Amino acid sequence: MKNSKPSKQRLDQLLTSLGYASRSESKKLISSGLVTVDGKCITKPDFKAFHHDVAFGGEPLDVCEGIVILMNKPLGVVCSHDDGEGKLVYSLLPLRWQKRDPKISTIGRLDKETSGLLLLTDDGQLLHRLTSPKYHIPKLYEVTLDRPLNGNETDIFAAGTLMLNGEKSPCLPAKLIIIDDTHVTLEITEGRYHQVRRMFAAVGNHVTALHRSRIGDLTLGDLMSGEYRLLERKNFPELL
Ligand code: URA
């Protein structure tokens, strides 16, 4: 359970919050003898136990509340809970995770047509902290441009004076590394709406492909598009 001390929970509550079944279904599953605590079959739904002592159908329970997922988001999927917007990133997760309560949400968003490193969590406090405007962790983007660079973009982005349409304050300094005249990496420490695309629009260019490859020290490693892995928070104390 997040970073706090684990506490005992009712078995029916545990199964429901982890997405195994509705509250009434969970009671039935427990009564039918599918749940063990410390290896002993328990059929009382209101029995209280620690998450790590409980098994369902002989298998340990799914990871408890406080889950953090690192996904390689594919192009064409949407960071939203509204399925009117297209295929959702959550549809790439196991069905049970999609039914958890508290629900899993993306930490910030990537546009539908942006791929790469995306974090997801069910921890509201973590989500709030990492998406706060006060939080300035570097995020690295690989950018393909429609037109060759002018040559002055590195200085403009580094100056911390670039104003985006409709914004009240300039973008914080950002680091541009030129690979060739239509391929760059850009490191930013903010998360404004469509920020990378708007920064290039502000210098008269257009982004044709965008991929996020790093947040802080987190990278995709060998995750293929659409794949994800669980993060051990203790390995990233400075971030998570
Ligand atoms: N900047 C953008 O323009 N889009 C993203 O998805 C992320 C950063």
Image: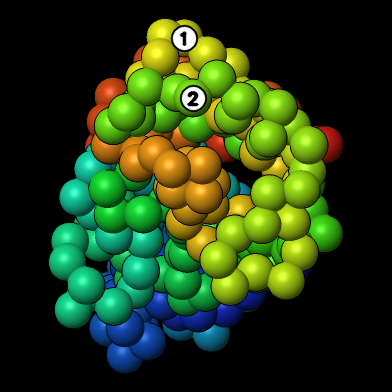
Residue 43 vertical position relative to residue 199 in the rendered view, above or below: below
Q: What color scheme is it?
A: rainbow
Residue placed most toward the observer, 25 or 161 = 161
Residue placed most toward the observer, 210 or 228 = 210
- In the figure, is residue 87 to the left or right of 31? left
Q: Amino acid at mark 1?
A: Ile
Distance from mark 1 CB to nearest ligand 1 atom below 8 Å: no
Residue 186 vertical position relative to residue 87 in the rendered view, above or below: above
Between the residue at mark 2 and the residue at mark 1, the CA separation in whole angstroms equals 14 Å
Quarter where residue 174 is shown: top right
Give the residue at mark 2.
150
Give the residue at mark 1.
179
Residue sitting at x 28%, y 37%: 208
Residue 64 vertical position relative to residue 82 in the rendered view, above or below: above
Q: Position of residue 216 (x, y in %)?
A: 69, 31
Residue placed most toward the observer, 103 or 189 = 189
Residue sitting at x 65%, y 69%: 167
Q: Which mark is residue 148?
A: none
Q: Secondary structure at mark 1?
A: strand
Q: Amino acid at mark 2?
A: Asn
Q: Earlier in the sequence, mark 2 or mark 1?
A: 2
Residue sitting at x 49%, y 24%: 150
Quarter where residue 25 is shown: bottom left
Q: Nearer the viewer, mark 2 or mark 1?
A: 2
Few, some or many residues within 10 Å of mark 1 (<14, 14–19, 20+): few
In the rendered image, the residue lying farthest to the bottom is 24
**The C terminus lies in quadrant:** top right
